[in-house]
């Protein structure tokens, strides 16, 4: 995919990106002024959004996103057939392969949403953290209504990958979400201690082998007895967050929840 910035990478989006680096209190004032002078633009088509509109996308692009809505597995959140009258546990959850307690996501990882996440994750367009974090609001509120969450944790990157990319997309999302809900974010207790090859193109079995033993908990006191909200951009087979959850549970975490912007589903 081309690394050229899209036509809608305007002055406003550049300034919004800069505002992400400003300290929290000053940042709120700066972003408020910027939104008044330069309303945020839709990340899909570049259309300027009204300053009072809190949605992530314009109505036209919003319709292009395949949202995940009931019925879905009440545990892992995987969508189920609309022919099913009620939500029920999926086969994976019935066999107990997951270490996390519950997972929710906003949309399917395809089409316009897949393109935007790719730009955010691989092309340095970190200003997209705003609309993507806004997308976490609905599934995030559901998890917060079901559980007493104590702490947010992003899925960590290996230090070499972090050096290559320059940022951890999950950490950017976690910071934005934590600020919006008034919850602490722990960026350092969970560590990716072993280099892993990219998961793209690997089978489920290969993914599980690739990330096995790749994470470690630096400070168990931070998670012992607590409910952790583990945050990532995309959930594919769930093997990465599953390994993170296993480490957190071994460290004494009471519950581990998973929240992602998108999920890959093969129907």
Image: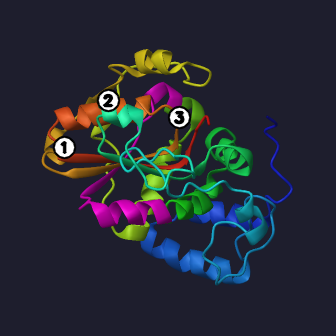
Residue 88, compared with residue 196, is above or below; it is below
User: Start and end of the magenta stretch?
Assistant: 138-161
Mark in the foreground, 1 or 2: 2
Residue 24 placement: quadrant:
bottom left
User: Looking at this view, is 38 or 107 the one in front?
Assistant: 107
Residue at 53%, 34% (x, y): give it: 236
Please provide percent x and percent y for residue 50.
Answer: 72, 81
Looking at the rendered structure, which numbered label has been put on residue 236? 3
Assess whether mark 2 and mark 3 are in contact (beta carbons under 8 angstroms): no
Which sits earlier in the primary sequence, circle 1 or circle 2? 2
Give the labeled residue for mark 1: 253
Mark in the foreground, 3 or 2: 2
Please provide percent x and percent y for residue 195.
Answer: 44, 19
Mark 1 Cα within 10 Å, few/some/many (few <14, many 20+)? Answer: many
140 lies left or right of 15: left
Assess whether mark 3 and mark 1 are in contact (beta carbons under 8 angstroms): no
Q: Residue furthest right?
A: 7
**Location of the N terminus (image quadrant):** top right
Q: Secondary structure at mark 3?
A: loop
Mark 3 Cα within 10 Å, few/some/many (few <14, many 20+)? Answer: some
**Residue 127 highlighted magenta (yes or no):** no
Give the labeled residue for mark 2: 95
240 lies left or right of 203: left
Real-space Cα distance between discs 3 and 2? 18 Å
Real-space Cα distance between discs 1 and 3? 23 Å
Q: Is residue 184 visible?
A: yes
Residue 205, compared with residue 82, is above or below; it is above
Residue 201 placement: quadrant:
top right
Mark in the foreground, 1 or 3: 3
């Amino acid at each position: 995919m081309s690394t050229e910035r899209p036509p809608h990478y305007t002055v406003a989006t550049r300034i919004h990106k800069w505002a992400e680096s400003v300290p929290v209190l000053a940042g709120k004032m700066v972003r408020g002024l910027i939104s008044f002078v330069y309303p945020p633009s839709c990340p899909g088509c570049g259309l300027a959004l009204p300053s009072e509109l809190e949605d992530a996308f314009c109505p036209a692009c919003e319709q292009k996103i395949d949202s995940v809505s009931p019925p879905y597995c009440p545990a892992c959140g995987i969508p189920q057939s609309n022919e099913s009258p009620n939500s029920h546990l999926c086969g994976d959850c019935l066999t107990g392969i997951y270490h996390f307690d519950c997972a929710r996501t906003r949309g399917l990882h395809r089409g316009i949403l897949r393109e935007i996440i790719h730009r955010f994750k691989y092309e340095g367009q970190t200003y997209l953290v705003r609309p993507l974090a806004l997308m976490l609001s609905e599934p995030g509120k559901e998890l917060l209504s079901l559980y007493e969450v104590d702490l947010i944790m992003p899925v960590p990157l290996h230090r070499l990958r972090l050096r290559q990319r320059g940022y951890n997309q999950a950490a950017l999302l976690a910071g934005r979400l934590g600020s919006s809900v008034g919850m602490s974010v722990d960026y350092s207790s969970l560590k990716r201690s072993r280099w892993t090859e990219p998961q793209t193109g690997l089978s489920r079995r290969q993914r599980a082998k690739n990330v096995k033993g790749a994470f470690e908990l630096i400070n168990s006191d931070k998670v012992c007895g607590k409910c952790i909200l583990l945050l990532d951009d995309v959930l594919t087979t769930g093997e990465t967050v599953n390994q993170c959850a296993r480490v957190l549970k071994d460290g004494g975490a009471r519950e581990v929840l998973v929240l992602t912007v998108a999920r890959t589903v093969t129907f």
